[in-house]
Amino acid sequence: MPQWQHITYSNQITTEHYGKQITVGGWVQDLRNLGGISFLQLRDREGVIQITSLKKKNKELFELVASLPRESVVLVTGMVKESKEARAGFEILPDRIDVLNRAEAPLPLGVVDKVGADLDTRLNNRFMDLRKEEVRAVFQVEAKAVEGIRQFLLGNGFVEVHTPKIVAAGAEGGSTLFPIKYFDRNAYLAQSPQLYKQNLMATGFDRIFEVAHAYRAEASDTIRHIAEFISLDVELAFIESSEDIMAVAEGIAVAGIEHVRAHAQKELEILGAKLESPSAPFPRVKYKDAVEIVKGQGMRIEHGEDLGTEGEKALGEYMKREKQCELYFITEFPTSLKRGTFYAKRFDDDPETTGYFDLDYRGQEIVSGGQREHRYAVLTEQMRENNLNLESFDFYLKGFRFGMPPHGGFGFGVERYVQKMLGLSNIREAVLYPRDRARLVP
Ligand code: AMO
């Protein structure tokens, strides 16, 4: 790493530094004062360094250290000395301490307290909460997962695109749209890049992806829904069936996990998360068989009904127990269930069924997609069936009238993926600053 910040990180200090002077910077995590000697635990992004001060060596400096409130930010310049007692194997004997920012007391949230605060208090003081290494580790894992997925997609000829988040029409049903004022017109926050990614299939960009926020006015308060989530969207053209799309979804689910396993080992350890290499191809369970499995688990469900949270969970338990498998597709969703998805292609020889699929991870849907209806006449018919006003979809529909190849894609919920990967009980733990019905700040 280039030395932009002119400080040495705790994990960069080696035996080579012993006997030499360096500068470290960070937060005062803890301070033990034994009268003639004090031990300050200084936390930086990589770990904790012990700063040992002796009163007889420098009284003024000793008193400055003693006066430091917890979580203040300091720069410490001093000599690195081997130490059997310090956890890192060395300590720093300070020659100079610059107090860059003195923290107020009491703290709104403890950083090293053993007693955990509730999620609301943590989220209300997120900057403080993020000082805990196990909280930051979640976002390091998320960054590595997305990095692995990006590498996979870029390596396979996909182009990263950015579509508008201020839109004139929704694609995922009106009830979850956030209306906004757009100059003197009404507009909405995008629920999904759906219309744009399909429109791009008419351009020659035949493999695209986007990683961006999507917005849903989800009325219910659940552990897997938020109002602003990261949707990793993929679309590709010249496909033969939904199977071609599933292969990409499978590839990115594996790529993200493998990249985390390879590049976030320390974070996985901090989080105590066990992550095994998934074996591909993932099993494909037809929707109609999934219903039977869920029924066999004692749940009351009829063919044509949504599996719902409980059904997905029951299927997840079954797949784990019987197939030792945590990632699996549910395929061939009935048209009746996907009817709101006006753009889903129905099977030509069985219009009651679509090639649409979900990818579930440990009993929760993380991806949904399939082959689209690319024939203008059939598409407009399906839109009319959904009582959609075709005029408000003019730009979208035009794309189908002048040369649109067969295509398909999916939306991949990044936070749900990370939530399941790390076994987090609430999706909000995988969002830096979550948005939901109750939360708009911070
Ligand atoms: P869908 O609505 O199923 O499909 O969303 C795709 C994936 O996005 C994630 N997701 C959410 N995550 C957190 N909070 C939410 N409120 C939320 N809503 C959705 C889930 C889900 O599987 N346009 C289609 C995709 C496509 O066909 O290309 C769509 O948006 O992980």
Image: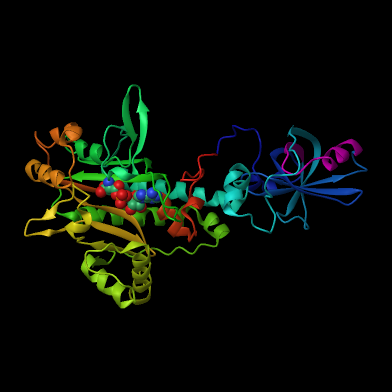
Q: Is residue 13 left or right of residue 409?
A: right
Q: Position of residue 36 (x, y in %)?
A: 92, 48
Q: Nearer the viewer, residue 426 or 138?
A: 426
Q: Is residue 431 visible?
A: yes
Which colouring convention does the figure follow? rainbow
Residue stretch in magenta: 59-78
Please name the residue shown 35% across and 22% down the image: 183
Furthest toward the top, the residue is: 184
Q: Is residue 436 left or right of residue 182?
A: right
Q: Position of residue 19 (x, y in %)?
A: 77, 44
Q: Is residue 326 visible?
A: no
Q: Could you tell me which quadrant the N terminus lies in?
A: top right
Q: How many marks?
A: 0
Q: Is residue 239 left or right of residue 209?
A: left
Q: Position of residue 28 (x, y in %)?
A: 73, 44
Please name the residue shown 23% across and 39% down the image: 195
Q: Residue 154 sits in which quadrant? A: top left
Q: Nearer the viewer, residue 21 or 172?
A: 172
Magenta-colored stretch includes residue 1: no
Instruction: In the rendered view, tell whether residue 150 sits above or below residue 268.
Output: above
Q: Nearer the viewer, residue 194 or 19?
A: 194
Please name the residue shown 25% across and 74% down the image: 292
Q: Is residue 253 left or right of residue 379?
A: right
Q: Position of residue 11 (x, y in %)?
A: 63, 48
Q: Residue 241 sits in which quadrant? A: bottom left
Please name the residue shown 84% across and 40% down the image: 67
Q: Could you tell me which quadrant the C terminus lies in?
A: top right
